[in-house]
Image: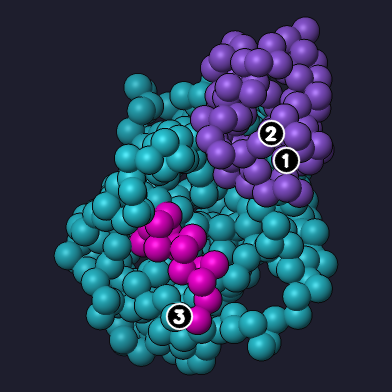
Amino acid sequence: MKEKVYELLSILNCDGDFESSTDFLADELLDSFNVIELVSLLESEFEIKIPGMDIVPENFANIDDIIKLIEKNQK
Amino acid sequence: MKQIFKNIKISAIYSFVPETIVYFDDEVIDADSARNRMIKKSMGYGGRRRTKHSTSTLDMHVYALNYLMSNNIITKEEIGGIIVTAFTPPYYAPQMGDLLKMKLELSNDIYTVDNWDGCCGYLSGLMEAAMLLNYIENDKKVLLLTGDSYNHLPENNQTMQVHMIKYGGDAWSVTVLEHGSEKDNMPMIIKSHGSRMMEKKGGSFSDFYGKDVVNPEILMDNPNQVFRFFQNTIPACINEMIEYSDVGKEQIAGYSVIQANSFAVNKYAEALDIPYEKMPSNLVERYGDASASINPIIIDELLEKLEDTENHKFMVVGYGSGLKYGAAILNMNRDIKHGIVVTDL
């Protein structure tokens, strides 16, 4: 799953060093538009629906947060 | 405020749009980039309507009221009040309602009021119209006018320019409210966070939100904060309205929800388990972010989809600047005079 998420992140920012970052937003690897785009990609790739209330910066801060969000919505 | 307004009905809803359409693909630099394609898909951007540079919001409403009068939908004598909601009036003063009276030679006795409730303007305008109707003669009607034109954006606000040039759509509308029967009730809820504003927008002929006059402490202009605020409050508000009105969710034939983008509206539908087709989110693709005027446009589309002439309940949901938000339930049927008029303005 981690590799797939990295792959999706690279679509949004092909030059971004996501593996070294612990805060994608603070490091300006993602902006608010990217988060919306990422939600669409995750929903399509993992066949999930991410509730609007979960679309908050802290759920997209780093790879672990994103994976937690996916797993939560797979249940 | 939470209130069930009684003996009030809507007898006509007309929306108006300019004939000129500008497309997202033509306005953004490098439309074929992966990012722009994804923004377009996620947010639902497509085309938006734009008035001519010489057209003011006042011109738009003069056109609309002349249209209604020449098509015998309203007479001058029937007008008891005019509520105008706009972010882009031609002037602070004189107010648009007063200018309309002058331009159309309407009676001095007509009560007019302008509000600046932006995307929540249709909803707050409905509430003001309902309150006004309680105090005017039975043979008088109240007109609710929404409308904005972003063709005169100020030059000195880059954020505003970027947002409104790409996504802001020009549209305007007139809703006619009149005294109804005992069964014509209109439950409404309007709330406001109040301590913060949400947006800085420009007037059609003046920059009335210059940064010199706005206290940044009262602004919530971080998109994440705004998104989170409304994702929390709007589904809760819709549920509160369903409970307050005692109208079951399954009885609501359609929802007219403000839409700056389709993504947020789809998330409301998912949160409430409402079918997407009952809560249309694709209007932004054809009209851009038309602020309060998108509510009547959506109502028009919902009316067109009705398959019978029975009464149906629509829920109108508005939210916007001032973090004001709310909902109303309207009794609607296909016989209500309605339409979307394409103009050469």
Which numbered mark, 1 or 3, is in the foreground of this view? 1
Taking the image as shown, residue B213 lies to the left or right of residue B58, namely right
Residue displayed at 54% across by 17% down: A44
Calculate the distance from the C-alpha at mark 3 to the C-alpha at mark 2: 38 Å
**Residue B53 image point, x, y percent:** 27, 76
Q: Are marks 1 and 3 on the same chain?
A: no
Q: Residues within 10 Å of mark 2 (few under 14, many from 20)?
A: some
Q: Secondary structure at mark 3?
A: loop
Q: Earlier in the sequence, mark 2 or mark 1?
A: 2
Q: Secondary structure at mark 1?
A: loop
Residues drawn in magenta:
B156-170
Identify the main secondary structure in magenta: helix
Calculate the distance from the C-alpha at mark 1 to the C-alpha at mark 3: 34 Å
- As drawn, the label of residue B154 is 3
Which chain is mark 3 on? B
Which chain is mark 1 on? A
Question: Are the two marked residues, 1 and 3, in contact with CB atoms closer than 8 angstroms?
Answer: no
Nearest to the observer: residue A16 or residue A64: A16
**Residue B200 image point, x, y percent:** 60, 70
Which numbered mark, 3 or 2, is in the foreground of this view? 2
- As drawn, the label of residue A18 is 2
Chain painted in cyan in the figure: B
The residue tagged 1 is A24
